[in-house]
Image (cartoon, rainbow, N blue to C red):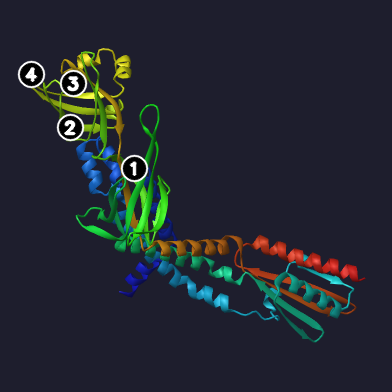
């Protein structure tokens, strides 16, 4: 039992497992970036076989960041980091708490010849120079004088030995923040017609409504189109109210969310509201045209009494051919439904014969009347995605902690330096030894720098 436990502990405390898990998480992140996720996957469904889409959907490929696979990898990485830290932290903590002693004979054993030199300066003078140098370079140092010899020790970067554990802790806090958001976070959608306000959102994958602590009003929605009819930019002017008093106003753009009291609002979609109106001009045998403005569902009688006209639909960009209105005429000669395009002349120029091929695109199909769409009083609704993630502050704190830990790991290292000054007959020998658990080249450079500084200072005193 103990042997099996030891094997399991060794497996979860291995660096190889950490590398494997991080690689798998990175792989899933790449897949999640390349493959459309959630609602965006609906468009992809039309371009692949139903069987393949069903299989990928069952494997949660279209919602990877909420999949059981991703959560399992996060859990295993957490276990790996905790066990790795428990395995190695005690030694690092003992190393961190260890206090140096100026007198350490072991560090001077097998000392390279270039790490010592003889000088004719007197020992007290050399000791004072060394003390001043260590104070400038290390700030704090220890000194012991004994039997004509002086011993010094100093250290720097003590906290860097804890850097890797700060990184571990930050990743665990990051995962905790993600899990808090996954369990307690909320995500929903809402459509707001221009001039109207809402105080609740429909939760995603649920029939429930989530009340908001304030009202959200869409004061204005604006959209710009390319020449081809595709939307160029669109934005919502929102006002947030409490007790009918504005508490915040702002412009909501794509990729520029608004955050208020823990709720984040994204510009998700838009569309023409049913309340939009179409302005029509009705011509008959060259007589003075009749002008009328109607909403969907409204109707009127033809001036000659030949029938009644009803507006069925109003489209801002019907089949990417521009604004259009669908009319139904109930007359004595029969019933007919047809589309009236605002840019019918341009459409006929670009598609000769389209009226003959598609009779319902003919605005004069109900003779002797000819219908012209002169304009549209468009009224839009704005589609908002609303999220509330209580784990966001936790993730932000983890990110700051992660940066601090990485800076300690990458740009700092713990090193200790010992300097010994001994009187040898009429000369003084100065020796410098160092110790570091990483960046040996950096330690050697620092030792040589100290030697050069001491030699230079001693030369100036002569």
Categorize mark 4 by other alpha carbons within 10 Å: few (<14), some (14-19), many (20+): few
Q: Is residue 307 visible?
A: yes
Which of the marked residues, 1 or 4, is nearer the chain's N terminus? Answer: 1
Q: CA distance from mark 3 to mark 1?
A: 40 Å
Residue 294: quadrant of the picture:
top left
Of the image marks 3 and 2, the number of the one nearer the N terminus:
2
Q: Mark 3, mark 4: which one is toward the viewer?
A: 4
Residue under the point 41% across and 69% down: 83
Any part of residue 109 in sight: no
Task: Assign the C terminus to one quadrant of the image.
Answer: bottom right
Residue positioned 43% across, 67% down in the render:
84
Q: Name the residue tied to disc 2.
A: 312
- Location of mark 4 (residue): 333
Which residue is labeled 1 in the image? 35
Residue 299's place in the image compared with 107, above or below, is: above
User: Which residue extends farthest front?
Assistant: 288
Depth check, mark 1 against mark 4: the one in front is: 4
Q: Position of residue 18 (x, y in %)?
A: 42, 60
Q: Quadrant of residue 330?
A: top left
Q: Earlier in the sequence, mark 4 or mark 2?
A: 2
Gap in angstroms between the C-alphas marked 1 and 2: 39 Å
Seen at 31% across and 47% down, the residue is 195
Mark closer to the observer (1, 2): 2
The label shown at residue 360 is 3
Q: Secondary structure at mark 3?
A: helix
Q: Earlier in the sequence, mark 3 or mark 1?
A: 1
């Amino acid at each position: 039992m103990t042997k099996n436990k030891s094997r399991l502990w060794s497996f979860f405390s291995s660096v190889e497992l950490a590398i494997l898990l991080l690689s798998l998480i990175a792989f899933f992140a790449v897949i999640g970036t390349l493959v459309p996720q959630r609602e965006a996957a609906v468009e992809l469904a039309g371009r692949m076989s139903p069987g393949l889409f069903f299989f990928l959907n069952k494997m949660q490929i279209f919602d990877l960041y909420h999949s059981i696979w991703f959560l399992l990898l996060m859990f295993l990485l957490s276990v790996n980091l905790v066990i790795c830290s428990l395995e190695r932290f005690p030694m690092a903590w003992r190393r961190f708490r260890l206090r140096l002693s100026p007198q350490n004979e072991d560090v001077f054993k097998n000392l390279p010849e270039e790490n010592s030199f003889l000088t004719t300066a007197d020992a007290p003078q050399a000791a004072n120079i060394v003390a001043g140098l260590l104070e400038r370079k290390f700030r704090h140092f220890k000194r012991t004088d004994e039997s004509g010899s002086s011993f010094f020790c100093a250290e720097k970067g003590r906290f860097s030995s804890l850097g890797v554990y700060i990184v571990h802790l930050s990743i665990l806090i990051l995962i905790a923040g993600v899990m808090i958001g996954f369990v307690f976070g909320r995500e929903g959608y809402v459509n707001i017609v221009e001039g109207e306000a809402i105080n609740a959102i429909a939760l995603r994958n649920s029939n429930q409504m989530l009340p908001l602590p304030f009202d959200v009003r869409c004061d204005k929605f604006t959209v710009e189109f390319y020449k081809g009819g595709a939307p160029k930019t669109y934005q919502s002017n929102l006002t947030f109210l409490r007790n009918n008093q504005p508490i915040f106003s702002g412009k909501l753009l794509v990729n520029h969310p608004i955050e208020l009291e823990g709720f984040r609002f994204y510009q998700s979609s838009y569309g023409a509201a049913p309340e939009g109106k179409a302005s029509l001009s009705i011509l008959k045998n060259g007589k003075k045209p009749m002008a009328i403005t109607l909403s969907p569902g409204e109707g009127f009688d033809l001036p000659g009494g030949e029938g009644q006209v009803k507006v069925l639909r109003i489209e801002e960009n019907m089949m990417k051919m521009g604004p259009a209105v669908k009319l139904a005429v109930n007359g004595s000669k029969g019933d007919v439904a047809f589309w009236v395009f605002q840019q019918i002349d341009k459409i006929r120029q670009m598609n000769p014969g389209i009226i003959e091929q598609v009779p319902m695109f003919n605005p004069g199909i109900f003779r002797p009347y000819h219908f012209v769409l002169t304009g549209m009083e468009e009224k839009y609704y704005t589609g908002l995605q609303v999220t509330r993630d209580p784990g966001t502050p936790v993730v932000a704190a983890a990110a700051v902690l992660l940066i601090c830990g990485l800076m300690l790991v990458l740009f700092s290292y713990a090193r200790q330096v010992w300097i010994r000054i001994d009187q040898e007959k009429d000369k003084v020998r100065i020796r410098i030894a160092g110790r570091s658990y990483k960046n040996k080249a950096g330690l050697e450079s620092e030792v040589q720098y100290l030697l050069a500084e001491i030699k230079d200072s001693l030369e100036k005193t002569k």
